[in-house]
Image: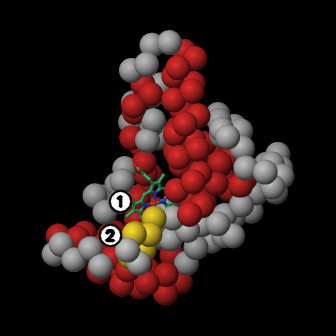
Amino acid sequence: MRTVPALQTSVTAALRAAFGALLIGVAGLAAAHGDVTPQVVDTKGLPSLGSEWRAENPYRGHAEAIKIGASAYNQNCARCHGLEAISGGVAPDLRKMDNECVSLRVEARKKACVNEVDQYYASVVRKGRVRNGAVYMPPFDGILNQEATWAIKAYLETRRERPL
Ligand code: HEC
């Protein structure tokens, strides 16, 4: 992971130059580099989830999932979203993902809000973000299984900017 800050600097520079399309080039560069090729994650230590995607994170607060998720995040997401989920401005800061749920006072509404964010999260991670042919974020379907995807969310929940 030593090369991550350098990569981030170059990505930020590209953004500053306001050439959105350069992102593809940068992502391609990153993918070509050994350290940041998407990594398959070993999730054998986690309760298996089957093939049907869950509507909410089944691993919330699960210690082993958080550990595996932290490592999976560093291998697959940190190069764009920042080490320890602290964004350098290239990609959204994932510590903020549940922020909109924090101010909800009724517990049931807060829970529904977090579940909605879960669904949004899983959908973005699986499909990536591609607009007008530009790959802002690569799809992780087929690279990360359901277990790894939710383990990363469980880790991100420990990094929330505003704890629930
Ligand atoms: C090549 C860089 C890159 C990688 C790698 C990457 N992302 Fe992203 N991600 C982005 C960018 C850029 C956006 C914003 C895209 C847009 O503008 O639509 C984004 C958006 C998101 C969003 C939506 C956030 C929001 O506030 O709407 C989530 C969730 C997300 N990424 C999670 C992840 C996870 C989890 C991983 C690792 C498995 C990951 N990303 C890997 C670049 C990346």
Q: Residue at x 42, y 48 (%)?
A: 94
Ligand 1 sits in which quadrant?
bottom left
Where does residue 153 sit, x and y in percent of width and height?
58, 46
User: What residue is shown with label 1?
Assistant: 91
- Residue 59 visible? The answer is no
Q: Outermost residue toward the left?
A: 17
Where does residue 6 sit, x and y in percent of width and height?
32, 74
Give the total of numbered labels: 2
Where does residue 30 sit, x and y in percent of width and height?
43, 80
Q: Judge whether 100 appears above or below 38 on screen.
A: above
Residue 81: image quadrant is: bottom left
Disc 2 marks a residue whose amino acid type is Gln
Q: Residue at x 51, y 22 (%)?
A: 110
User: What residue is shown with label 2?
Assistant: 8
Where does residue 4 sit, x and y in percent of width and height?
39, 71
Tell me: 118 left or right of 162: right
Tell me: 24 left or right of 38: left
Q: Residue at x 49, y 87 (%)?
A: 32
Residue 20: image quadrant is: bottom left
Whether label 1 lies within 8 Å of ligand 1 gets the answer yes
Q: Nearer the viewer, residue 123 or 30?
A: 123
Rounded to the nearest angstrom, the CA distance separating label 2 from label 1 is 10 Å
Tell me: 128 left or right of 96: right
- Residue 36 visible? The answer is yes
Q: Residue at x 39, y 20 (%)?
A: 103
Q: Nearer the viewer, residue 41 or 5?
A: 41
Disc 1 marks a residue whose amino acid type is Ala
Residue 144: image quadrant is: bottom right
